[in-house]
Image: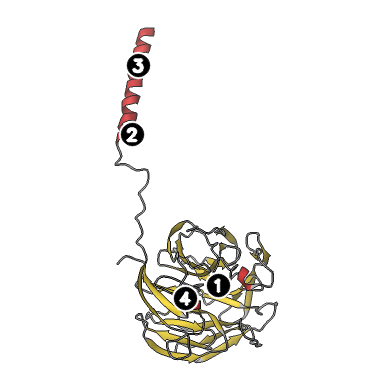
Amino acid sequence: MQGAIAMFSRSASCICFVLLAFLAANTNCPSRAAEPELPKAHFLLAWGAEGDEPGEFEFPIGIAVNRSDKILVADHYNHRVQKFDRAGKFLSQFKVLPNPGGIALDTAGNIYVSHFQASKRSDITPHRVSVYSPEGKQLHAWGKTGTGPGEFNYPGGLAVAPNGHIYVADQTNHRVQVLGPGGTFLTTWGKYGSKPGEFGGNTNNMSRTGGPDFLALDRQGNIYATGGMDGRVQKFTADGKFLLAFGENEDRPGSFGRDFESLGTMHGPIGICIDAQDRLWISAAGGRIQQFTADGRYLRGFGEKQGEGEGEFLAPHGLAIDSHGDLYVVDSYNHRVQKFDVTGK
C-alpha cells in the first residue's frame, strides 16, 4: 500500500511538472490583451502671430470646437473671439467683454466666455461670465468681482453640461462654481489647501496659478480640474464629490513639474480636454502636451522642447479636439494655435 502511494505521488508530480512546463511554454495565452501602441503626435499646421489683425492674437487663452468643426479662440488682450476653419483659415470675429479667457459651448452652440482683470495692464475689468449666440450677439453677462456665491475672482476655464449647468473654475477663490442655465448660482466646492478637493496649497492663496485653472467634462458627467502649481489634476462627480487626483511636480514625461523658462517658477497643468474615449489631453506650463487615461495613467506626450518651432510651445493653455480627432493647442506666449494628428490616420 505504501509503495502504491509512493508511485501515485511520483506520477502526480510528473503530471504537475508536465502541466507547468506546458503553461510556461505556451506564450499564446496572455492573461489580458495587450494595449495597442498609440501613435506619435504629428504636426499638421500652425496659424497666428502677435498682433490685432484678423487671424492674429495677443495672448490667446481658451479654445473650443463647435459641431461644424469651426475653431473658436478667446483672444485675451484683443477683447474678441475669432473663428477659423480646420485649416486655420480666418472666417470671422466678434467683440466680447474685456479680457476673455476660458471659452465653452452649450448644445445649442451658444458661446460662454470668462473674463478677468488683465495680467499685464492696470484695469478694473469685472470678473464675470458672458454668453453669446453662435453669431456673436451678447445674450447675458453674469457675476462680479468678489467671493460670494455667483461672484468670481479670476474665473478661468469653463465647461457646460448637456443639462445646461455651467461649471466655472473660480481660480483665485480656489473653488468650482456651478451656475444654472440662466446664470443662477447652484452650488460650489473647493477651498484653498492641498487636501483632496482643495486647490492652490503649494502657492500663495492670492495666486490664480494654484487652480482650479481649466475644466473638462467626460461622458459620465464627471468634472476634471487642473491645479497648476499643485501639479495635479482632480476628478469630481457632477455635484462635487472628490473621486481621485493624479500628478506631481517632477520634471519628466507623465508629470507636470518642468518650469516655464520665461517665468522661472511657473509650472503645472493648465489646459485640459477629453477625447471620444474619455482620455485626457493636458497641457503644462513647461510645454508638455500629455495624454492620460480617465484614472490618471500616463499614455503618451510631446512638446519636450520649449520654443517657437513646430511642436514646441511656450506655456500652452487651452486644448480642443475636432470631430476628426485632431488636437488643437493654444500656444499662448507664441500667440498662435498649433494643430496635430494624434490618431495616426
Q: Amino acid at mark 3?
A: Arg
Q: Nearer the viewer, residue 74 or 335?
A: 335
According to the picture, the residue beneath numbered tag 1 turns out to be 262
According to the picture, the residue beneath numbered tag 2 turns out to be 24
Q: Are marks 4 and 2 in contact (CB under 8 Å)?
A: no
Mark 4 and mark 3: span between their CA atoms?
Answer: 71 Å
Helix, strand or loop status at disc 3: helix
Name the front one of labels 4 and 2: 4
Q: Nearer the viewer, residue 339 or 240?
A: 339
Mark 2 and mark 1: span between their CA atoms?
Answer: 55 Å
Mark 4 and mark 2: span between their CA atoms?
Answer: 51 Å
Mark 3 and mark 1: span between their CA atoms?
Answer: 73 Å
According to the picture, the residue beneath numbered tag 3 turns out to be 10
Q: Amino acid at mark 1?
A: Ser
Sort mark 3 into few (<14), some (14-19) or many (20+) by Cα contacts within 10 Å.
Answer: few
Q: Earlier in the sequence, mark 4 or mark 2?
A: 2
Name the front one of labels 3 and 1: 1
Helix, strand or loop status at disc 4: strand
Q: Is residue 6 left or right of residue 219?
A: left
Q: Which disc number belongs to residue 331?
A: 4
Q: Is residue 275 above or below residue 107?
A: above
Q: Amino acid at mark 4?
A: Asp
